[in-house]
Structures are given as structure tokens and as C-alpha cells.
Image (cartoon, rainbow, N blue to C red):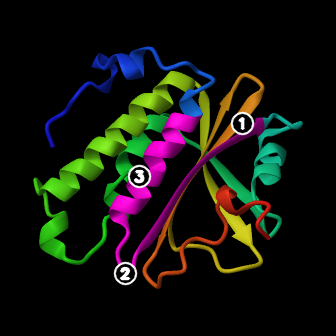
Amino acid sequence: MTAFDWTALSAARNARPDATPGTINHALRFLEDLLEETDHVCTFTLTDGPLLGDVSTAVDALLPTSCRASRLAPVSSWSTLVDAALPGLFLPGHPAYVWAERMPARQLAESVAGWVLALLRRIWPGSVESWELTVDTSHWYEAVYVDLVVRVDERVWLHTSGSATDGTGPRCPAATRGAE
């Protein structure tokens, strides 16, 4: 895919910090729909909450009650982790030709992921503390997932990405909190 600087768009440059999380979640919903196949379901979430003591405690508060943070591994760059994961780790396998390099569907998914990354940069400076999250759960948890924790001042953000090939979707991301 040809690189494009999404910050060249005024919608990214002028995105209000208070409205940006909603815009990100809209883009993530679109990406979920785009990548969905009969036997392949993706979920992507972005949630935040106050820093409650330490980061691990704050993350546990954002996760469903059946989940808890078991490991927070510092990462040098949250954007590198997100860029490597979206959409590549979550592309459906069938039909293979649709998702091949330079095919329109893949280019669209990569473009939407680029838009998400540009918007995340509006709320997360490149130098913020960030961690890759490992989750323990009392229920089945997705085998293909990327969970990222970012601390900005006194807020903790949780970005989860997961997919299932059996149509059930992830059962532990923050988006399911309160639905239990």
C-alpha cells in the first residue's frame, strides 16, 4: 500500500481531543464490518478510565469481571504495535484473492487502519508509556488478539483487537464489560 499522511486531512489535524475517541470507535466498527466473513468475526475496542492507583489496577477496572491483567510488558512504541496488528493479523483467509496484497478490499482495510492510527496519535503522544497486555480469564479468550494499554497523564486507555474463526468473537475485550 502506498503510504499516505492522514494528518494532511483537516479532519485528522483538527480533530477535537474530546470527540476523537468516538471517531476512532466509528472507524473500528467499520473495520470490523469490513473484515467480517461467515466464519471470521473481529472486534476492536477503545476504552479509557481514570488511573486507579497503578496501571494494572486501572486496566482490571476496564476489563470484564471474568478477566484480569496478568502481564503488562512495556513497549517502546504503541504505534508500532498497532500498525503491525491492524489490519494484517485480522485479515480473513477466504476468499484468499480478495485479501491479497494490492487488492481493493485489503487496501481499504489498510487505509482504515491508517486512519485509526492517525486519530490515535491525536490522543496518544508518541512518547507516552505503553504496554502490551496479557489477560487471564475464567472463560475462553481469543487466540488471535492484541491488547494495548496506554497511559496519558491520569488516564489509562485500553485498545483491544481480537478475532475468531468460529463466529463467536472475542469474549474478553473491554467492549463486553457490563454485558455479563
**Residue 38: assigned label:** 2
Question: Relative to the observer, which residue lies in front, 126 or 118?
Answer: 118
Q: Residue 152, located in which quarter of the rendered image?
A: top right
Q: Residue 128, located in which quarter of the rendered image?
A: top right
Q: Earlier in the sequence, mark 3 or mark 1?
A: 3
Residue 114 in magenta stretch: no
**Distance of mark 3 from mark 2, alpha carbons?**
16 Å
Residue placed furthest toward the right: 53
The three-letter code of the residue at mark 3 reads: Phe
Proximity of marks 1 and 2: CB atoms separated by less than 8 Å: no
Relative placement, left or right, of 150 versus 94 is right
Q: Earlier in the sequence, mark 3 or mark 2?
A: 3
Residue topped by disc 3: 30
Q: Residue at x 21, y 56 (%)?
A: 106
Q: Considering only vertical position in the picture, is 101 above or below 164?
A: above
Q: Position of residue 125 (x, y in %)?
A: 53, 22
Q: Position of residue 29 (x, y in %)?
A: 47, 53
Relative placement, left or right, of 17 versus 118 is right
Q: Position of residue 21 (x, y in %)?
A: 58, 34
Q: Could you classify mark 3 by the number of other residues whose Cα lies within 10 Å: few (under 14), some (14-19), or many (20 or more)? A: some
The three-letter code of the residue at mark 1 reads: Val
Residue topped by disc 1: 156
Proximity of marks 3 and 2: CB atoms separated by less than 8 Å: no
